[in-house]
Image: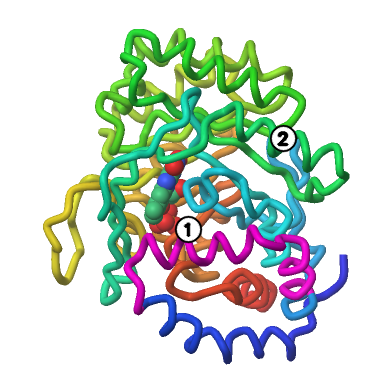
Amino acid sequence: MGQPPREQSVIVDAIWPLIRRFLFRMDAEHAHDFTLRTIASAPRLWGAVARGLLGSPPSTLACTVAGLKLASPIGLAAGLDKNGVGIPFWPALGFGFIEIGTVTAHPQPGNPAPRMFRLVEDAALINRMGFNNHGADELSRRLTILRERGQWPTVPVGVNLGKSKVTPIENAISDYAFSAKRMKGLADYLTVNVSSPNTPGLRSLQDRALLEPLLPAVIAEAGGIPVFVKLAPDLTDEAIVDAVNLAVECGISGIIATNTTIGRVGLSTDPGEPGGLSGRPLWPLAHKKILTTLAAADKRVPVIGVGGIESADQVRQLMDAGCAAVQLYSSFIFQGPGLIARLHRDLEKK
Ligand SMILES: Cc1cc2nc3c(=O)[nH]c(=O)nc-3n(C[C@H](O)[C@H](O)[C@H](O)COP(=O)(O)O)c2cc1C
């Protein structure tokens, strides 16, 4: 892999404030939809432009996690591209792996809008999207086309699975298993999402009694690809230890910690909107819970750290603490498309 053309990525950083001003005039979800529609209109073309401007991750950052070869340890977290419409584009920004979804067995509209809020002063987001997505069948069709046309990226693409809102919690297993089956031969890895705060009852699936049958059921349908489980930062340390031990016993390939929090600690102004908080104020809690997860995993399975990451220092802290990789979402919204190349440059300097 080539070195990034450093001077050129400066162009992206120079025009980002203008693009940001334009996007931030729209409400958060409209800006998100507008951007995704633009990317989805020509993901490979936009990808070629981005790659030309940003270069590729330095080869020194390539790593392997659960047998997956990552171009960089920095991945795109779930939720940004729920329907996988921009898959050929994201790696061009430097992401070393990408996670699409959450996808559910049934297509669903999610919660009523407004449901995504930008907290600019705090570099944070609150969302209660509620797994709006086109469903596992449609995603499977989209992924099949990419595979058949040879447009699958060279970086791993994971699919994050959740429970459909219409499915009662007691039928959650078959709901997840259905989606896992649809992704067979397509996804490079799966993530069992039991930690989003916006689907009633979902986080109860982190309890031993429900997680114990769920994880093996997904693993059985996964066709041998790695299966991760994603945990909430609002779990007590004891609950994290319990969930990690159970996940390891079940044969899970890795833990993703953490999802958004229902807490509101660290906000300069609380808009009073229910939902999951992400971005800068999540970092202290996520960091603490990632360390708890690392201690519980005790090197038996890799841990992917996520929650409030916005600098190379934070990436370095998590990697030094033992994380195999990291993911981010919110800081990308605030810092723009040059963020990953910038993090790579800063990581290389250290
Ligand atoms: C608008 C939005 C939607 C999200 N949707 C999902 C989702 O569908 N599934 C999921 O597992 N996580 C979802 N997340 C959580 C992120 O993947 C990530 O775990 C969380 O935002 C913390 O990382 P960050 O502080 O870098 O954003 C979402 C986050 C945001 C901001």
304 and 96: which is toward the camera: 96
Mark 1 within 8 Å of ligand 1, using the beta carbon: yes
Between 14 and 33, the one nearer to me in the picture: 33
Q: Main secondary structure of the magenta part?
A: helix
Q: Which mark is residue 188?
A: 2
Circle 2 packing at 10 Å, graded few (<14), some (14-19), many (20+), is: many
Where does residue 224 sit, x and y in percent of width and height?
Answer: 73, 19
Q: Mark 1 points at which residue?
A: 329
Verify whether residue 320 appears in magenta.
Answer: no
Q: Is residue 36 inside the magenta stretch? A: yes
Return the residue nearer the eye: 155 or 72: 155
Q: Nearer the viewer, residue 289 or 41?
A: 41
Side of 148 where 84 appears, left or right: left
| Residue numbers of the magenta segment | 25-51
* Left or right side of 14 for 61: right
Q: What residue is at 68 percent from the left and 43 percent from the top?
A: 157
Residue at 62%, 50% in the rendered image: 85
Note whether residue 300 is visible. no
Place residue 188 in its image quadrant.
top right
Rendered image quadrant of residue 58: bottom right
Instruction: Give the mark nearer the N terminus: 2 vs 1.
Output: 2
Q: Which residue appears at 67% of the width and 67% of the height?
A: 93
**Residue 156 at what x, y percent from top left?**
72, 44
Question: Label 2 to label 1, Cα distance in Å?
Answer: 20 Å
Q: Quadrant of the N terminus?
A: bottom right
Give the structural element (helix, strand or loop) at label 1.
loop
